[in-house]
Image (cartoon, rainbow, N blue to C red):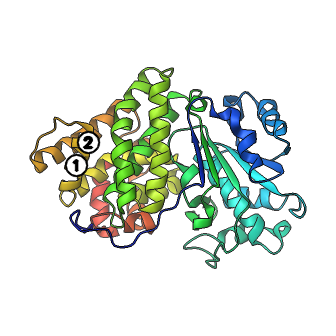
Amino acid sequence: MPPSPDAGPARYDFLAPSSILFGAGRLAELGEVAARFGREAWLVTGSRSLEACGGESAVAALLRAAGLDVARVGTCMGEPTVADVAGIVSTLPRIEGRAPVVVAIGGGATIDLAKAVAALATNLASPLECDDDTVADHLEGVGRGLQIGRPPLPVVAVPTTAGTGAEATRNAVISCPRRRFKKSMRSPLLVPRAALVDPILTASCPRGVTAASGLDAITQLIESFVCRFRAPLPRALVLDALPRAVAALPKVLADPRDLDARAAMSHAALLSGMALTNSGLGMAHGVAAALGIECGTPHGVACAVMLPVAVAVNRRVCQDDFAVLERAIDPEAPRDDGAAADGFVRRVEHLCAAAGTPRRLAEVGLSRDRLTWLAENSGGASMRGNPVSLDPQTLLPILERVW
């Protein structure tokens, strides 16, 4: 059971980027920010993310104007794999005498790739010999469980989507199609040194990406608020960000040019990253990782499928918290906690339906005969944080209902 809201804070830590720059037009300050951390900018970008910034030449000009040399060291073509990380790390220039800063421009996958590269660049005795197994050895639950003990290269994260909040998290999610896992490299040292969040950069996202990313952020806010390991500061962040996101997502889906709505979603994504990294997650994320491995489902889409289910499953033990969230969104919500909590469950269901994301596991390509596999592989840190304890036998009938 989650801790009582009446209990006073015991002990907690709080991690966040040492510098956060938020607002429309802040991309213009990229060179100044990166120059605080190094003399040479190593770019890791998404396949299309530089277009949102005016192209590679425009980004390079911003960095060079601040006195930095610029080299593009990697491109993220999808959710990062151990091979992607190893391929970049093994071809990096030597660090000695360079003072590099890794500038990550893209969605959450790109930022996670950059964080993993920055960490292994300083934590391997021979980065040039990095291979798939070397990367896996630094992920939780697989390999040798090696830790990130030395500070990574500094990372400046510039998100071009509003979803994962990777610009503020202490983990990098990496998968291995061959060994069929999706695990995190995790350390407080992985939090980017700076997050530069310019909502204008999300304007080029297709509607489907905007919807899935937005529901990912909303899922993270909800799950971090109610998870077993929740802490006071993350909950305060959720109470600020969630009402804004619930109001903004339908607006930005209806009018992609609504910059105020985009700013609210970028703000929500940033705060969701801080909330989850200092608290935890739950069932929706626990299933989403396994679904990504089995079906290649993009993370945000997987969260969108599972969010209404997770909220319904946790309704009984999270009544008080769901009532708090519903009243934060709608001050006119019922004073009765049960009625308010029921209203919150319905609100989440309607929001996901309006977003137009898949609603059933079959819609993302899961075969019915793989439901048992999905239940058995939906574990990890996220599932351990879920308010209701769910083992594979308990989870299976829940997944059958949403298939």
* Badge 1 vs badge 2, beta-carbon distance below 8 Å: yes
> x, y percentage for residue 338?
11, 50
Which residue is pictured at 85% across the width and 42% down the height? 67
Does residue 243 appear to the left or right of 273 in the view shown? left
Q: Which residue is mark 2?
A: 328
Q: Which residue is mark 1?
A: 324
Amino acid type of the residue tagged 2 in the rendering: Ala
Residue at the limit of the structure toward the bottom, as seen here: 144
Classify 10 Å Cα crowding around label 1: few (below 14), some (14-19), many (20 and above).
many
In this view, 98 is above or below 136: above
Could you say where residue 103 lies in the image, as x and y percent from the top left? 72, 47
User: Which residue occupies 44% across, 50% down?
Assistant: 366
Judge by depth and name the residue closer to the eye, 73 or 15: 15
Badge 2: residue crowd in 10 Å (few <14, some 14–19, many ≥20):
some
Tell me: 68 left or right of 207.
right
Instruction: Name which quarter of the figure residue 70 lies in.
Output: top right
Does residue 401 sit above or below 257 in this rendering?
Answer: below
Mark 2 secondary-structure assignment = helix
Residue type, mark 1 in image: Val
Camera-nearest residue between 249 and 4: 4
- Between the residue at mark 1 and the residue at mark 2, the CA separation in whole angstroms equals 6 Å
What is the x, y in percent for residue 1? 25, 69
- Quadrant of the image occupied by residue 211: top left
Q: Which mark is residue 190?
A: none
42 lies above or below 91: above
